[in-house]
């Protein structure tokens, strides 16, 4: 009898199972498509920065938008929100953080991520020489929030502000053409980011409290006799205003030193940076001026006032003679980075120590 024919399963062609995804910055997406996406993202996510960014020359503006799109998307993923809106369910924050790191790594390797914001980052990183270390410095800020981390000391606050804003300022400076080895210019870019973040923290104390977040140092609260969890209590409004006044004084010092760096930028970039500094500085100063009433309503700078700041920034950029700042800020990028490298592991969630003796 004829032996039954043995059926051997056919293997797929080697080219189909071994072919690697080709590395291509931007994940294969076109530059113009990613720029269009990024422009819409910044228009939704930050009206102030969107306005200031239009003062850059076209090439720089588009690169700034691409970087912003990644920052905005990472922030939204970390907080489970949409363009800085209401915080979503925070369960699963660690998984979202892992996704941010994996997608960023793929973007830097030039691999497609299926997310235009990360593809945009891969493209601008290749164009401008942004590094993994720079990206990780920013991602560590999202990690702090994912761990429900809260600053105990002023040094802790400096660390947080660096990761969420100072490190972004450094990347923005590189996108504007600042050499990665120019530590002085990168320090000034970091100063600007720190100033922006201090203004944001001052303005958003009430919103952060509703979201069960706190960015004011516990030691400052103890000095003002504000009990943990009572920061927005009406009888502590004056003490809170005093703490925020300290934030704004630090903001102004960083802002003044950032202007020295802006003076070294090309005119269009200088104009954009000075406009942004004026707008965010105005927010911080408005909060300080309102004192205990700063959180009755969210402090905003209207479009007309923003345009006045843009106009004033133009003439400031033309003169290009920044005032000699006073004493250097207490926080420096170099010292913050040393503290970061030497810092202890981030505390477990919801572990906010009480003042000594309580």
Image (cartoon, helix red, strand yellow):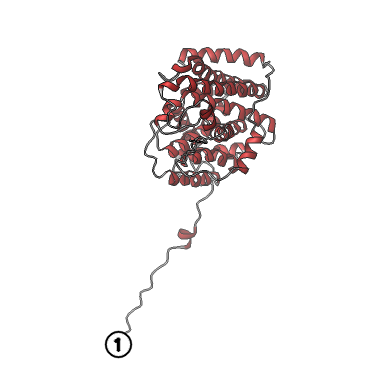
Query: Which of 298 and 232 lies nearest the eye of the viewer?
Result: 232
Q: Which residue is mark 1?
A: 1
Residue 290 in percent (x, y) is at: 48, 15
Query: How many callouts does the rendering have?
Result: 1
Query: Which of 46 and 41 lies nearest the eye of the viewer?
Result: 46
Toward the front, the furthest residue is 357
Q: Is the residue 10 above or below the residue 47 in the image? A: below
The secondary element bearing badge 1 is classed as loop
Toward the left, the furthest residue is 1
Please identify the quarter of the rendering in which residue 277 is found: top right
Residue 163 in percent (x, y) is at: 56, 36
Q: Residues within 10 Å of mark 1 (few under 14, many from 20)?
A: few
Q: Can see residue 171?
A: no
Please identify the quarter of the rendering in which residue 212 is found: top left
Q: Is the residue 150 above or below the residue 285 in the image? A: below
Point out the image quarter for the N terminus. bottom left
Residue 313 in percent (x, y) is at: 58, 15
Q: Can see residue 184?
A: yes
Residue 205 in percent (x, y) is at: 46, 26
Q: Is the residue 51 above or below the residue 209 in the image? A: above
Query: Which of 92 and 130 lies nearest the eye of the viewer?
Result: 92
Q: Is the residue 114 above or below the residue 33 in the image? A: below
| Residue at horizontal 52 percent and vertical 50 percent from the top | 22
């Amino acid at each position: 009898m004829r032996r039954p024919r043995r059926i051997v399963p056919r293997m797929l062609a080697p080219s189909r199972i071994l072919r690697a995804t080709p590395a291509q910055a931007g994940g294969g997406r076109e530059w113009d498509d990613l720029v269009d996406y990024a422009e819409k993202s910044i228009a939704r996510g930050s009206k102030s920065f969107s306005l200031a960014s239009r003062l850059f020359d076209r090439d720089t503006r588009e690169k700034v938008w691409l970087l912003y799109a990644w920052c905005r998307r990472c922030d939204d993923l970390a907080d489970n929100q949409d363009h800085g809106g209401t915080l979503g369910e925070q369960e699963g924050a660690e998984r979202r953080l892992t996704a941010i790191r994996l997608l960023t790594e793929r973007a830097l390797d030039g691999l497609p991520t299926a997310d235009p914001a990360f593809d945009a980052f891969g493209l601008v990183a290749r164009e401008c020489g942004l590094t993994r270390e720079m990206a990780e410095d920013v991602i560590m800020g999202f990690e702090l929030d994912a761990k429900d981390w809260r600053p105990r000391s002023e040094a802790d606050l400096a660390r947080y502000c660096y990761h969420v804003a100072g490190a972004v300022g450094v990347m923005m400076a590189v996108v504007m053409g600042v050499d990665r080895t120019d530590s002085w210019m990168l320090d000034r870019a970091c100063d600007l980011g720190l100033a922006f973040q201090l203004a944001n923290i001052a303005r958003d104390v009430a919103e952060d409290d509703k979201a069960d977040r706190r960015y004011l140092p516990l030691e400052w609260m103890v000095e003002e006799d504000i009990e943990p969890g009572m920061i927005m209590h009406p009888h502590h409004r004056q003490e809170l205003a005093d703490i925020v006044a300290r934030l704004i004084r630090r903001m102004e010092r960083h802002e003044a030193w950032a202007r020295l760096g802006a003076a070294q930028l090309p005119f269009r970039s200088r104009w954009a940076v000075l406009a942004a500094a004026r707008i965010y500085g105005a927010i911080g100063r408005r909060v300080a001026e309102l004192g205990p009433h700063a959180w009755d309503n969210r402090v905003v700078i209207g479009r007309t006032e923003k345009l006045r700041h843009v106009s004033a920034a133009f003439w400031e950029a033309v003169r290009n003679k920044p005032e000699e700042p006073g004493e250097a800020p207490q926080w420096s990028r170099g010292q913050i980075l040393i503290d970061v490298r030497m810092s202890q592991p981030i505390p477990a969630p919801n572990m906010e120590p009480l003042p000594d003796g309580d």
